[in-house]
Image: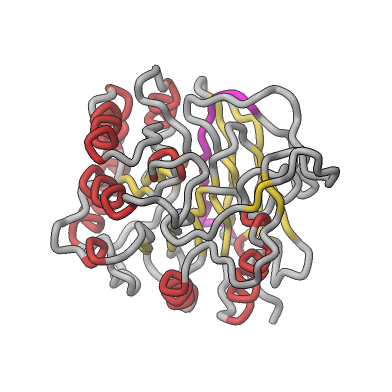
């Protein structure tokens, strides 16, 4: 590792250690705080099996790694079994190397929450949250320990190069999904239909209020980590599209807070793709889906009218490269396989991720 990169990572690590992980207010910024240049992210890892993507991520030399959910496959409401699953991840050689290489942030999805496609009905979700916070090293006195749900936000970098990472919890408060009848003839091929109940929630009111506060904080790029896809709406599996009122509410919240720089990071689907939403949005909303770290999907295509570029179905991770020195600071989003090959790529100037003046 070169000296400049080593110093930058030490500073990022110091920032993560010095600030309460659950602080809902923006991190205090200083002129000495390093700007993030490379951010890796991924989902869907079963540590009982080889995870070569971990080593590939280390080779990509990220300044930060974000786990977007399904970080273990426990599928249990039993706290002891859930802790056993996390121990498997903790002792995985690739994960241990990754943990030493860069700071890590994480949220969960259904399999580490404990119930496949589960939501607020989970009978032991408080214990699942406790196990999650213990594994990821959240201090015992952190406000996150008193919160219902694992949502969290943190900002990195000085003014003009500030990245805000907003990790949502799409499980703890989520209303029931609507099952598709077996003889249903709608366009959806998956298990679910959009929930027509306007009171159905994805986040719960407390988290919605918290998210509004986060979107008013200054940032040049906002990574909203949502675990399930936000933009895709055609496959009929778990997605924000299954709660259309909530999906629209988030667009309106971005608009009403005048929040610039929003990009969604998601996982869940066992394939990777990039989606772009332009319909009645304040600016193009990208959703970068990286899935899975060692969970592969079917080679058969899945419908997505918003897809930009190809779909990739073998193990992968996502990488964001930020060029702060360009005349117009820009971000490059990539989907990379376990050998380091790029399969999907999207480049955008950060000025294009802003409401019109």
Quadrant containing the N terminus is top left
Q: What residue do we see at 37% from left, 46% from top?
A: 64
Count how many numbered circles sit on residues in the image. 0
Q: What residue do we see at 53% from left, 62% from top?
A: 202
Q: Quadrant of residue 189?
A: top right
Q: In which quarter of the image is residue 349?
A: bottom right
Q: Where is residue 334 in the image (x, y as percent from the top left)?
A: 59, 39
Quadrant containing the C terminus is bottom right
Query: In the figure, is residue 183 to the left or right of 55?
Result: right
Q: What residue do we see at 23% from left, 67% from top?
A: 143
Q: Where is residue 325 in the image (x, y as percent from the top left)?
A: 51, 57
Please say whether residue 40 is visible from this viewpoint: no
Please say whether residue 264 is visible from this viewpoint: yes
Per the image, is 316 magenta?
A: yes
Identify the magenta region: 313-327
Query: In the figure, is residue 324 to the left or right of 181?
Result: left
Closest to the observer, 357 or 185: 185
Query: Measured along the vertical axis of the image, is residue 349 above or below residue 208?
Result: above
Query: In the figure, is residue 343 to the left or right of 134?
Result: right
Q: Position of residue 291 (x, y in %)?
A: 55, 35
Closest to the observer, 194 or 103: 194
From this viewpoint, which residue is outermost toward the top? Answer: 50
Closest to the observer, 76 or 256: 76
Q: What residue do we see at 33% from left, 64% from top?
A: 148
Per the image, is 346 magenta?
A: no
């Amino acid at each position: 590792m070169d000296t400049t990169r080593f110093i930058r990572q030490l500073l990022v690590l110091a920032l993560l250690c010095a600030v309460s992980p659950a602080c809902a207010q923006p991190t205090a910024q200083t002129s000495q705080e390093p700007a993030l240049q490379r951010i890796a992210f991924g989902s869907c890892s079963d540590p009982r099996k080889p995870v070569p993507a971990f080593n590939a991520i280390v080779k990509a030399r990220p300044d930060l790694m974000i786990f977007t959910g399904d970080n273990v496959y426990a599928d249990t409401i039993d706290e002891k079994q859930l802790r056993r699953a996390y121990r498997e991840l903790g002792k995985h050689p690739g994960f241990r190397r990754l943990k030493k290489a860069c700071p890590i942030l994480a949220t969960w999805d259904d399999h580490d929450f404990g119930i496949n496609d589960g939501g607020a009905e989970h009978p032991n979700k408080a214990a699942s949250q406790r196990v999650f916070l213990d594994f990821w090293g959240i201090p015992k006195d952190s406000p996150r320990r008193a919160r219902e749900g694992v949502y969290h936000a943190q900002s990195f970098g000085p003014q003009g190069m500030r990245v805000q990472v907003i990790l949502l919890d799409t499980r703890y408060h989520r209303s029931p999904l609507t099952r598709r009848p077996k003889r249903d003839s709608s366009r959806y091929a998956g298990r679910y239909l959009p929930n027509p109940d306007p009171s159905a929630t994805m986040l719960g009111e407390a988290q919605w209020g918290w998210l509004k506060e986060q979107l008013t904080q200054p940032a040049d790029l906002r990574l909203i980590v949502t675990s399930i896809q936000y933009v895709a709406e055609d496959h009929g599996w778990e997605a924000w599209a299954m709660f259309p009122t909530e999906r629209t509410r988030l667009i309106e919240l971005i608009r009403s807070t005048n929040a610039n720089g929003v990009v969604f990071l998601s996982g869940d689907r066992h394939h990777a793709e990039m989606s772009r939403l332009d319909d009645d949005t304040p600016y193009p909303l990208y959703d970068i889906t990286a899935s899975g770290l060692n969970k592969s999907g079917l080679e058969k295509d899945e419908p997505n009218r918003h897809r930009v570029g190809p779909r990739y179905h073998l193990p992968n991770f996502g990488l964001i490269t930020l060029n702060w020195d360009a005349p117009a600071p820009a971000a490059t989003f990539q989907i990379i396989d376990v050998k380091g090959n790029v399969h999907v790529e999207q480049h955008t100037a950060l000025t294009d991720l802003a409401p019109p003046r």
